[in-house]
Image: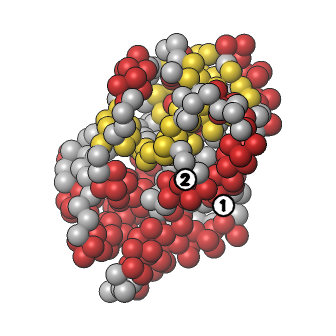
Amino acid sequence: MKICIYGAGSIGCYIGGRLAASGADVTFITRPDTYRELSKSGLKLTDYLGNNLSIPAHELKLSLDPNVILDVDIVFVCVKSTATEQVAERLQQILADSNSKLKHTPYIISFQNGLSNVAMLKQFLPDLRILEGMIPFNVVALGTGCFHQGTAGAIHVKKFSHQQDLAQLFQRAQLDIIFDQDMLAVQWAKVLLNLNNSINALSKLPLKAQLLNYQYRQCLAMAQQETLDLLDLAQIKPANLTAVSAHFLPKIISLPNVLFKILSRKMLKIDPVARSSMQDDLIAGRRTEVDWINGEVVKLADQLNTQAPINALLIKLIKQAEVSGIEFSISADELKARLNSVKK
């Protein structure tokens, strides 16, 4: 089974690197700057458990040409949600130009945040087999080809006919993978956890330090509870990605620090250097994925003819931070006060 990673960022390099290190045939479609970096440094992959893998540069299959998708079995789309339409248009053009060059129709798995990326890909690529995927853990880019998995969790993918072949590759790479029929429930469960991304980005703290701050956790609990109320109204039951039911998350998160530390040991198995991808984007001056995380909540509220003021304010604050740059941050007390001021 040949795999192509379209979007060799933190997630793409880490997942693809783990598979390649275990012997899988993986090609990375990269940007020119990433191509130059990986061509010199290779890949170095570490995790919060202390594991350490290295792949020399000469063993990596790197490409600047998206046409490599014509000779693979599965494409992992790992670009930011902000780039999905651009990638879909590029793939559409490649397939239109290929004529008979396509050996077989590849599966495409979207390992991206939010709920709308697969629909976007299907709009441009109606003849391809496109599946939802979900990466639960955090990966930090440390520079010079180093990528660090800071948190735990099993990867989820929509059930499909050749899933056993993919399962064997992931098993060899010692990556947990689960195949689900109801990926909407999984995606909403991931959104609930990802609601912390905007709060972490505004805090400018590492994830672990931010989660140990009671006031910041109360802000997260407000955003999660607003989302759960909307999901109940829409009759959508989120999957359980943690040891506790999704509906109990705001209650656990709102506990005082002493109790939270006891009941959330697994949640706090986070490397001290781990940050949310949204914080990384703000630091790098990139557009964030807030519209595909908190924005999904606001979109659901619109569909239900109601409002989501907590998540709407978090979007507004992140947009301000995108304009203001790296100096923008909000203290826990101030953020909590601002969210309380709009709470229904």
Residue 123 place in picture, x, y as percent: 56, 59
Mark sitting earlier along the chain (2/1): 2
List the residue tagged with mark 2.
126
The answer to whether residue 43 shows anywhere in this view is: yes
Type of residue at label 1? Arg
SS at circle 1: loop
Residue 179 place in picture, x, y as percent: 32, 37
Label disc, if present, on residue 190 of the rendered structure: none
Nearest to the observer: residue 50 or residue 213: 50
Residue drawn at x 19%, y 59% as measured from the top left: 248
Nearest to the observer: residue 108 or residue 41: 108
Q: Is residue 269 above or below residue 344?
A: above
Within-10-Å neighbours for mark 2: few <14, some 14–19, many 20+: few
List the residue tagged with mark 1.
287
Residue drawn at x 61%, y 71% as measured from the top left: 319
Residue drawn at x 37%, y 43% as measured from the top left: 158
Q: Is residue 55 above or below residue 65?
A: above
Residue 49 place in picture, x, y as percent: 39, 25
SS at circle 2: loop
Q: Is residue 268 left or right of residue 87?
A: left
